[in-house]
Image (cartoon, rainbow, N blue to C red):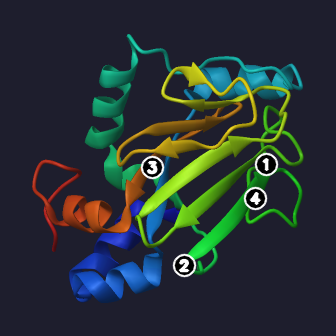
């Protein structure tokens, strides 16, 4: 995980295309668990989802994330080919390792399609589910992610941004501060 403030510094020193080459075609900005909830989950040895973003709470939570944007983390992902897949789970050989008891060993797969500039997410039969916003993916179909969607793997939630959007947000006043 890389702090957003480090990405902000990178975006200030690079033109958009170089930034995208460095970051990759998309980024996952982590939504932190509330501290009390995180402690409770660890104390219980949670393997059960404790709290998910609901549709009614989603706008307020996204606004809360954006006001503390520089304090959030971005999942670092390996370089991607024009069509590629990234595994998400607790196992060390996953492309995105999420060390959280609510995440299955092999939880989900993200598929990237460069030509269409779209990513999809597919649950792999996880115990605690994969979510887009408040909607749980019930079967193992690939579901498209839209720029700005909240995607959850168990209790671990991210906001999905295309790299171009993230670059733009990092330099915009009112989205975590102005570029320095």
Q: Are marks 2 and 1 in contact (CB under 8 Å)?
A: no
Q: Are marks 2 and 4 in contact (CB under 8 Å)?
A: no
Q: Residues within 10 Å of mark 1 (few under 14, many from 20)?
A: some
Q: Residues within 10 Å of mark 4 (few under 14, many from 20)?
A: many
The residues bearing labels 4 and 1 have C-alpha atoms spaced at a distance of 14 Å
Q: Which residue is mark 4?
A: 87
Task: From the top left corner, tell me how far across and down residue 156 is, in percent.
Answer: 64, 37
- The disc placed on residue 160 is 3
The residues bearing labels 2 and 1 have C-alpha atoms spaced at a distance of 28 Å
The residues bearing labels 3 and 1 have C-alpha atoms spaced at a distance of 19 Å
Task: From the top left corner, tell me how far across and down residue 167 is, in percent.
Answer: 27, 68
Closest to the observer, 5 or 52 = 52
- N-terminal label among 3 and 2: 2
Residue 58 vertical position relative to residue 87 in the rendered view, above or below = above
Q: Which residue is mark 2?
A: 82
Q: Which residue is mark 1?
A: 99
- N-terminal label among 4 and 1: 4
- N-terminal label among 3 and 1: 1
Q: In the drawing, does residue 15 fall left or right of residue 56? A: left
- N-terminal label among 3 and 4: 4
Residue 93 vertical position relative to residue 90 in the rendered view, above or below = below
Could you tell me which secondary element the residue under label 3 belongs to? strand
Task: From the top left corner, tell me how far across and down residue 46 is, in percent.
Answer: 84, 24
- N-terminal label among 2 and 4: 2
The residues bearing labels 3 and 4 have C-alpha atoms spaced at a distance of 16 Å
The residues bearing labels 3 and 2 have C-alpha atoms spaced at a distance of 18 Å
Residue at left offset 20%, top offset 64%: 168
Would you identify the image quadrant in which residue 45 lies? top right
């Amino acid at each position: 995980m890389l702090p957003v403030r480090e990405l902000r510094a990178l975006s200030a020193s690079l033109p958009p295309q170089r930034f995208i080459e460095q970051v990759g075609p998309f980024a996952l900005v982590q939504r932190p668990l509330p501290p009390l909830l995180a402690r409770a989950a660890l104390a219980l040895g949670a393997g059960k989802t404790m709290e998910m973003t609901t549709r009614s709470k989603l706008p307020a939570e996204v606004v809360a994330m954006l006001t503390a944007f520089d304090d959030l983390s971005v999942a670092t992902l390996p370089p991607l080919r024009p069509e590629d897949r990234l595994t998400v789970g607790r196992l060390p050989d996953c492309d995105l390792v999420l060390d959280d008891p609510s995440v299955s060993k092999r939880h989900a797969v993200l598929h990237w399609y460069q030509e269409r500039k779209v990513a999809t997410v597919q649950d792999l039969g996880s115990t605690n589910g994969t979510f887009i916003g408040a909607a749980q993916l019930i079967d193992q179909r690939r579901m498209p992610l839209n720029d700005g969607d909240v995607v959850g793997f168990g209790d671990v939630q991210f906001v999905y941004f295309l790299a171009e959007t993230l670059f733009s947000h990092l330099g915009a006043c009112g989205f975590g501060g102005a570029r320095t």
